[in-house]
Amino acid sequence: MNQREGDYVPIRDAENIQLGMFDKPLPCFGCGIGWFSFLLGFVFPLMWFFSAILYFGKYYNKDPRERSGLAACAIAVSDELNY
């Protein structure tokens, strides 16, 4: 890894394998299950309940990028139940 001699330097950290874990795109057209379910929930409100179950089941521990969309669905469910 001598940069002066022109050797290549690895982009990923060899000690932290999970660093490149989030390089792959999210499912559901790249917006994630949570946001996809949030948008689809305006047509099919049961999708909000499905995503709220995923949120309270801590599905976002698999991929933290899913947390905001799943939380939005949980809020939508709570608003729907208040009416």
Image (cartoon, rainbow, N blue to C red):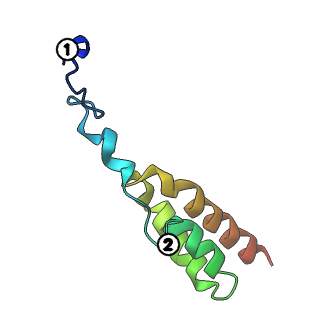
Q: Residue at the spot x=44%, y=62% of the render?
A: 26
Foreground: 41 or 75? 41
Q: Residue at the spot x=47%, y=73% of the render?
A: 28
Q: Residue at the spot x=29%, y=41% of the render?
A: 18
Badge 1 is on which residue? 5
Bin the neighbour count of mark 1 within 10 Å (Cα to Cα): few under 14, some 14-19, many 20 and up: few
Left or right of 3? Residue 46 is right
Question: Residue 44's x, y, as percent?
Answer: 63, 88
Q: Residue at the spot x=28%, y=34% of the render?
A: 12
Foreground: 52 or 7? 7
Left or right of 79? Residue 58 is left
Bin the neighbour count of mark 2 within 10 Å (Cα to Cα): few under 14, some 14-19, many 20 and up: few
* Picture quarter with the C terminus: bottom right
Structural distance between the alpha carbons of marks 1 and 2: 43 Å
Left or right of 40? Residue 82 is right
**Which one is in front in this view, the residue at disc 1 or the one at disc 2?**
1
Left or right of 28? Residue 79 is right
Q: Dot 1 lies on which element? A: helix
Give above or below for 8 relative to 61. Answer: above
Badge 2 is on which residue? 29
- Amino acid on which the number 1 mark rests in the picture: Glu
* Picture quarter with the N terminus: top left
Q: Earlier in the sequence, mark 1 or mark 2?
A: 1
Q: Dot 2 lies on which element? A: loop
Disc number for residue 18: none
Query: What residue occupies the far right of the structure in this picture?
Result: 83
